[in-house]
Image: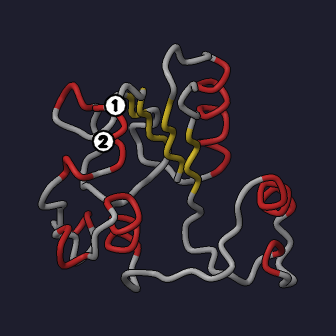
Amino acid sequence: MTPPNILFFHAHNTGRFIEPYGHAVPTPHLLRLARSGSLFRRAFSAAPSCSPSRAAFLTGQYPHCSGMLGLAHRGFALSHPQRHIARLLSDHGYETAQCGTEHVHAHEKGTGDGGLYDHVLTRDHSAKAADVAPVVCDYLHSKPKRPFFLNIG
């Protein structure tokens, strides 16, 4: 069986008051994505701020175990970056790429220069959809040769 491609999409600071959850804020593209994929209806956040909660999701560890006790751009970092899902998937033959922001490490770099990903598709760390979407489309149209993990923030 061929390993699946994994597209991990996280929207920044949207909260749950959006259309896929039955609220009035119109988000038609997120609604369409939710209808064709997975939607978390009962979720738990490991921390109240972005870096520790994303690190928990991407490492499977609580913030006090991952070392990410605060914001990455304030100097907090993963104690064991090898436990990040991008590193684990890379070790198992996946091509890994990151686009937009992740807020788990201060300076996202490709794994070749000490970072977590094979490819960092946006170097300016923009989280604006208008900046990220075309880059994601270009990556997907490039038809990666191996199964891929694409983290989009």
Q: Secondary structure at mark 1?
A: loop
Q: Which residue is mark 2?
A: 88
**Image quadrant where residue 38 sits:** bottom right
**Callout 2 touching callout 1 (CB < 8 Å):** yes
Q: Which residue lies at the image location 30% right of the left edge and 42% below the top edge?
A: 88
Q: Which label is found at residue 109?
A: none
Q: Which residue is mark 1?
A: 92
Q: Position of residue 116 (x, y in %)?
A: 27, 40
Report crowding for label 2: few under 14, some 14 to 19, many 20 or more residues within 10 A (C-alpha).
Answer: some
Q: Which quadrant would the N terminus be assigned to in this image?
A: top right
Q: Nearer the viewer, residue 131 or 27?
A: 27
**Image quadrant where residue 102 sits:** bottom left
Report crowding for label 1: few under 14, some 14 to 19, many 20 or more residues within 10 A (C-alpha).
Answer: few
Q: Position of residue 99 (x, y in %)?
A: 49, 41
Q: Name, please, the residue furthest toward the front.
A: 1
Q: Amino acid at mark 2?
A: Leu
Q: Which residue lies at the image location 78% right of the left edge and 54% below the top edge?
A: 33
As drawn, 147 above or below 74: above
Alpha-carbon distance for marks 2 and 1? Answer: 7 Å
